[in-house]
Image (tube, rainbow, N blue to C red):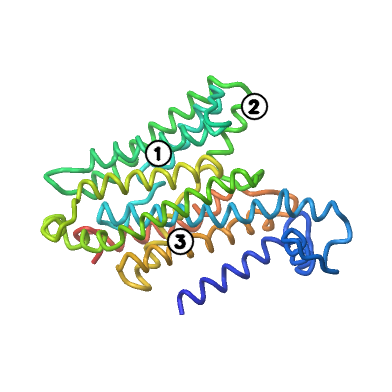
Amino acid sequence: MVLAALVLLLAVGLVMSATQGQLSVSSADVLGTVLHGLGVDTSWRPEREVTEQALWQIRFPRVVMALLVGAALAVGGAIMQAIFGNPLAEPGVVGVSAGAALGAAIGIVTGFTFAGGWGIAALAFLGGLLATIFVYATARSAGRTEVVTLLLTGIAVNAFAGAGLAFVMFAGDTAAREQIVFWQLGSMNGSRWSEVLVVAVVTVLASAVALVLARQYDLLALGERAAGHLGVRVEALRIGSIVVVALLTGVAVAFAGIIAFVGLVVPHLVRLSLGPAHRGLLLTSLLGGAVLLTWADLGARTLVGGADLPIGMLTALVGGPFFFWLVRRTRGRSGGWA
């Protein structure tokens, strides 16, 4: 029932996202445009060619980008909750997103180019990876991950990254400052098919790796010692998972900016609904993240006429109260899973 509801919500959200916005088109026009792109000509194509071009060059890349970024952030959040052993771990909360944004901002100001212009994405990945490694190393104490230390370290990393962003903005020119503001607010505006392809490849491959590791995450939930006795190389599993999370978060931040709380809200709600088995948890989180950000992007384009709201603001409006409830619910409980 949960999967069916998510699939239905995603299908409806995709249709509405494709038809609604500053340029409103009918469902028949959207279907005709898609079929024409696949080489099937019908009478449903839009009357004006400019409408068809706008759909393919502006609307469709944005819709697909929202779906992929939501899936990437939700899977990254589920992995972090698995390796840290508590439901409060999330790329945005522990500073991974801020680290990736700082890396992207440095790339913007310095004009760093790499592999055909993907320098910003590379620096975003590096920033997210370094932030994740720092948080993990600091939160480890006496062979276990301390929840309080994890959150405090996340606060420190977010503060440091915020200061770094301010300094980079001060050092950059006007154009660079405006682009950095984009990373801080989060938006799908301006998505291109080349960027969508990169996010799709990273999200699919990283999610596949996470699914392969799902059984080991289940064993890790029994405790590090028990998992080790059952053949799990705990430290190797955590380090590999950190790289996967950095990839997912880095590519999402590089092309969409900071979008908080998706990786916190979605995996935890899925766990409450379906239980802690990680194979189903990861798959459903991927779908739930896609649903959440598809609808959030639709709201960003339609809630205020003639305006494009920051999508990160909308997710924070939902995620902030949920995070407060989650902290209250887990207060005083060991590990936060009870």
Q: Position of residue 202 (x, y in %)?
A: 47, 48
10 Å neighbourhood of mark 3: few (<14), some, or many (≥20)?
A: many
Residue at image point 44% right, 47% down: 248
For the residues labelled 3 and 1, the Cα–Cα distance comes to 20 Å
Q: Is residue 4 above or below residue 147?
A: below
SS of the residue at dot 1? helix
Q: Quadrant of residue 214?
A: bottom left
Q: List x then y, in percent, for residue 220.
A: 21, 58
Q: Residue at x 47, y 52 (%)?
A: 203
Any mark on residue 88, and which?
A: none
Among numbered discs 2 and 3, the one appearing first in the sequence: 2
Relative to 167, is 20 on the left or the right? Answer: right
> Could you tell me which secondary element the residue under label 3 belongs to?
helix
- What secondary structure is marked by label 2? helix
Amino acid of disc 3: Leu
Amino acid residing under circle 2? Ala
Question: What residue did someone put label 3 on?
Answer: 286
The label nearer to you, 2 versus 3, is: 3
Q: Give the residue number, with chain letter if any, for mark 2.
A: 175
- Is residue 56 toward the left or the right of residue 281 in the image? right
Work out whether 227 lies above or below 125. Answer: below
Viewer-side label of 2, 1: 1
Mark 1 neighbour class, 10 Å CA radius: few under 14, some 14 to 19, many 20 or more:
many
Q: Residue at x 53, y 42 (%)?
A: 257
Q: Which residue is mark 1?
A: 128
